[in-house]
Amino acid sequence: MALDTIKQQISEASLREEKLVILVGPPGSGKSRILRQLSKKNNYLNLSEELSRRLLSIPREKRPEQVFYLLQEIVESQQESVLLFDNIEILFLPELDLEPLKVLSKLSREKTIVAAWVGSFDGSQLIWSEPGRPDYKVFSTDKDYLITPILD
């Protein structure tokens, strides 16, 4: 996928209410590399690392009720209008009780978010992980998401 195409999707997303671009592909397909190439002008965030740091000070039993506010803080604390989220695996932890796709959509109302999604897209369903793994999830894409498959 040409970097120019993704940049165009970012521009298109910035005009929407929910400004979310999802780069989807299996591990090693180049999603992180693309985010780093884009980061010359935008903020690249290792979301799992950033959120983990903030969750450490919160008791485990309070984390599910606080996690969305922490994510909002992360988004609001960034200067750039486009945020690049890599390593979003933390959003899928059962103990946080999140709906990852809905969370990303809500966060993207503030700023344009480009998220690296480990999995696949079949045209109507966004799939996280692989069948048989404990973190495997299938999401219906009834909204008009900007989803870009990244293949080797």
Image (spheres, helix red, strand yellow):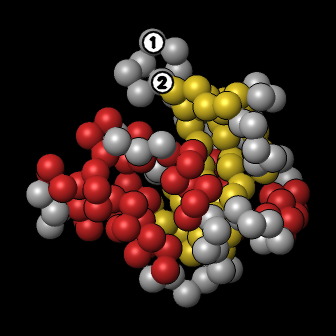
Q: List the single residue furthest toward the bottom.
A: 79
Name the residue located 52 percent from the left edge and 15 percent from the top edge: 131
Residue furthest to the left: 59
Q: Position of residue 152 (x, y in %)?
A: 73, 35
What's the residue at 16%, 63% (across, down)? Answer: 58
What is the crowding at mark 2: few (fewer than 14 residues within 10 Å), some, or many (at least 20)?
few
Badge 1 density bin: few <14, some 14–19, many ≥20, Cα 10 Å: few
| Callout 1 secondary element | loop
Say whether marks 1 and 2 touch (CB < 8 Å). Answer: yes
Which residue shows up at 44% across the image and 61% down it?
46
Q: Is residue 52 left or right of residue 3?
A: left
Across and down, in percent, residue 130 comes to 53, 21
Q: Quadrant of the rendered structure where residue 132 is?
A: top left
**Front residue of 125 and 9:** 125
Quarter assignment of residue 92? top left
The answer to whether 131 is drawn above or below residue 2 in the figure is: above
Q: Is residue 32 left or right of residue 95?
A: right
The answer to whether residue 61 is above or below residue 70 is above
Q: Inspect the image, locate mark 1, and give the three-letter code of the amino acid beneath it.
A: Gly
Residue at figure coordinates x 37%, y 21% from the top left: 134
Can you identify the residue that label 1 sits on? 132
Q: Is residue 90 left or right of residue 61?
A: right
Return the residue nearer the eye: 119 or 103: 103
The answer to whether any part of residue 40 appears in the image is: no
- The spot of residue 13 in percent (x, y) is 79, 64
Residue that label 2 marks: 136
Which residue type carries mark 2? Tyr
Res 140 quadrant in image = top right
Q: Is residue 15 visible?
A: yes
Residue 76 appears at what percent x and percent y? 49, 80
Q: Which residue extends farthest top?
A: 132
